Amino acid sequence: MNKTIIIIPTYNESQNIKKIITKIDSLKIENDFLIIDDNSPDKTYDVVKEMMITRTDINLIIQSKKNGLGTAYIRGFEWAIKKKYDRIIQIDADLSHNPQDIPTMIELMADYDMVIGSRYIKGINVVNWPMSRLILSYMANVYVKLITRMKINDSTSGYKCISTEVLKKINLKKINSQGYSFQIEVNFLASVNKFKIKEIPIIFHDRTVGESKMSKSIIFEAIFMVPKLALKKILRIW
């Protein structure tokens, strides 16, 4: 069995999902796929099912409703642990993450427990975002770093490789956040549990097809959750 599972959450990504899988296939790495679809109205899951007819390396979970990014990933993490994978790659379906970075991530996992694809470790490497969103994202990460004292420049990145040993150690049942908050919370739990984390520079390209899942509720969730994490760190109650 392959040791690496690539988890791709989807919601209305019917135009992108086949493209991202094909790009990853071109890398010729040994991996399986797990697509977790939030019951997409555009029937993204049907595109995946069609690919599964001729492939055994693609797995699909269809959720009953739109539960959000965090719920999708936690379900995927639990599935990967049960299936005894060694590592998980998180990547967005919208082609904003370049799959060419995956081999580097996997190679670094020989020395680290988590590798994060960072937009901000070497300046700002984001293409085609509106200035308002770029400033919001950058300042949000400065805020997270300042409040939590994590030595991570891009805590909201959704592009990373994680050892399943990390996920076995942290309590997934206690994670309730969605969106960017979910990424922050997982990084925080890995950090306070003394796992080795490495950031590598990536170039993030805004999606060209489909709609962003960003919302005000996701932003406010992150704003209010970060101080809670800092308090947990002080009280050592993670």
Image (spheres, grey):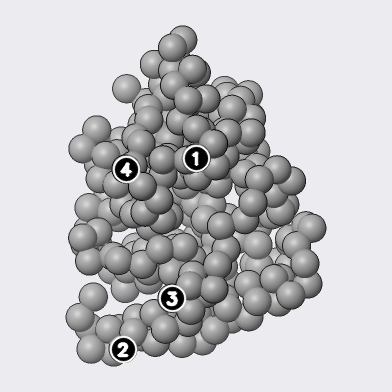
Which circle's residue, 1 or 3, is located before the other in the chain? 1
Seen in the picture, residue 40 relative to 72 is either above or below; the reply is above
- Name the amino acid type tagged 2: Leu
Res. 215 image quadrant: bottom right
Which circle's residue, 1 or 4, is located before the other in the chain? 1
Kindly identify which residue carries mark 3: 221
Quadrant, the N terminus: top left
Q: Residue furthest top?
A: 54
User: Closer to us: mark 3 or mark 4?
Assistant: 4
Distance, label 4 to label 2, CA atoms, is: 35 Å
Q: Residues within 10 Å of mark 3 (few under 14, many from 20)?
A: some
Query: Is residue 32 visible in the rendered structure shown here?
Result: no
Distance, label 3 to label 2, CA atoms, is: 16 Å
Quadrant, the C terminus: bottom left
For label 1, the SS is loop
Seen in the picture, residue 76 relative to 2 is either above or below; the reply is below
Look at 78% across and 57% down and name the residue there. 127
Distance, label 1 to label 4, CA atoms, is: 12 Å
Kindly identify which residue carries mark 2: 231
- Name the amino acid type tagged 4: Ser
- Name the amino acid type tagged 1: Pro
Mark number for residue 41?
A: 1
Which circle's residue, 3 or 2, is located before the other in the chain? 3
